Amino acid sequence: MTDVVLIHSTGQSAAGWDRLIAALEARGVRGHAVDLPNDRPELRADDYARALADRYGDLDRPIVLAHSGSGPLLPAAATALGARRQVWLAAWVPHPSLSFFDDARAHKEEAFEPGWIGRDPTVHDEAAIHFVYHDCDAETQAWALTTRRPFLPEAVYDEPVALEPAIPSTYIVALEDRTIRPGWQRRMALERLGIPPVELAGGHCPNVSRPADLAELLTRLDSTTYWSPRPNVVEGDNGVSVEVLGRTGIRYGERGRSCFVDSEVLAVPAIAVWPSGIRRWDPPHEDEPLTDDDRRRILQNIADAFASQDWGLELIDRGASA
């Protein structure tokens, strides 16, 4: 069963995920949400990631989703949890060289609806309803107001946060968002993540206003789509590419990095690939470590790519890495 770890926004508690969790469970997916500490402003992204890993570290390659202002927590959390995918739900994508505070100031007019700036929806009902829950019916609005909780990860916001491009990302734009402009959401997806976004009708909190639609989208995202643009090459919407170079050798790529994989075409037919045949990243990433976890991920991605094309090939693991 697929697991989805849900990181709440800066204005809502874990209870804000309740309706989405129920919608996911109806589709055979388990949702997990917890209140992160809101009385420890000194905590950094790795600290929050460790807290999530302590609680959910036994999950098998979950999807990890962050909402709104908790976007800067996502790369570290996804890494700590061994995520199969990062999902940015109307979330702020960190700039590689700016803190969130500096980034938000530099792009204030582009990023935010003017009336939203300076409003605190955790204490002002009118602001919450107008900017955050405007697409909800009255009953849902009343419930949503009970889920509010302030959360300000100040130390995280005060330093640049590195992305984790090795873990596939999906960005979900909230098309009727009155807080972070939808156009800015699209721009962050394209320019910072290098991916086209997925669009979802509704306001800033589709987990509240459209839980079934969001659950359906997340369920579909769990399946990677592969295609073969030319003979002996397979590409996936998770950023993976696999090219069989001949009787020996595979060129593997994932979101800007690549490596050569020793392989051998067997007579069965099958291609034999083993971890010790994955030695180092290609330039300009040759100084980055290539770990056993990387090797396991690469082997799994190659296996998935082959299986998707029904090539009649079997991937064979010939032992542990050297």
Image (cartoon, grey):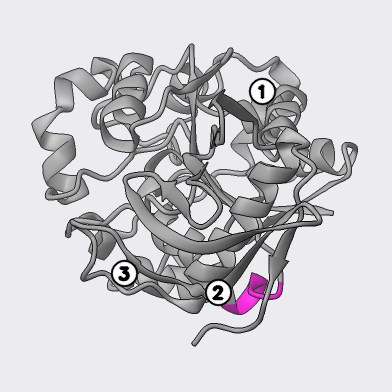
Q: Which residue is mark 3?
A: 44
Q: Is residue 46 magenta?
A: no
The local crowd at label 1, few if under 14, some if 14 to 19, many if 20 or more residues have their Cα within 10 Å, is many
Q: Residue at x 44, y 18 (%)?
A: 177
The x and y percentages for residue 288 are 26, 69
Q: Residue at x 29, y 17 (%)?
A: 113
Q: Is residue 56 magenta?
A: yes
Q: Is residue 52 above or below residue 179?
A: below
Residue at disc 1, secondary structure: helix
Q: Amino acid at mark 2?
A: Pro
Q: Which mark is residue 209?
A: 1
Q: How many marks?
A: 3
Q: Amino acid at mark 1?
A: Ser
Give, as a single range, the part of the protein colored magenta.
Answer: 54-58
The x and y percentages for residue 32 are 70, 57
Q: Which mark is residue 275?
A: 2
Residue at disc 2, secondary structure: strand
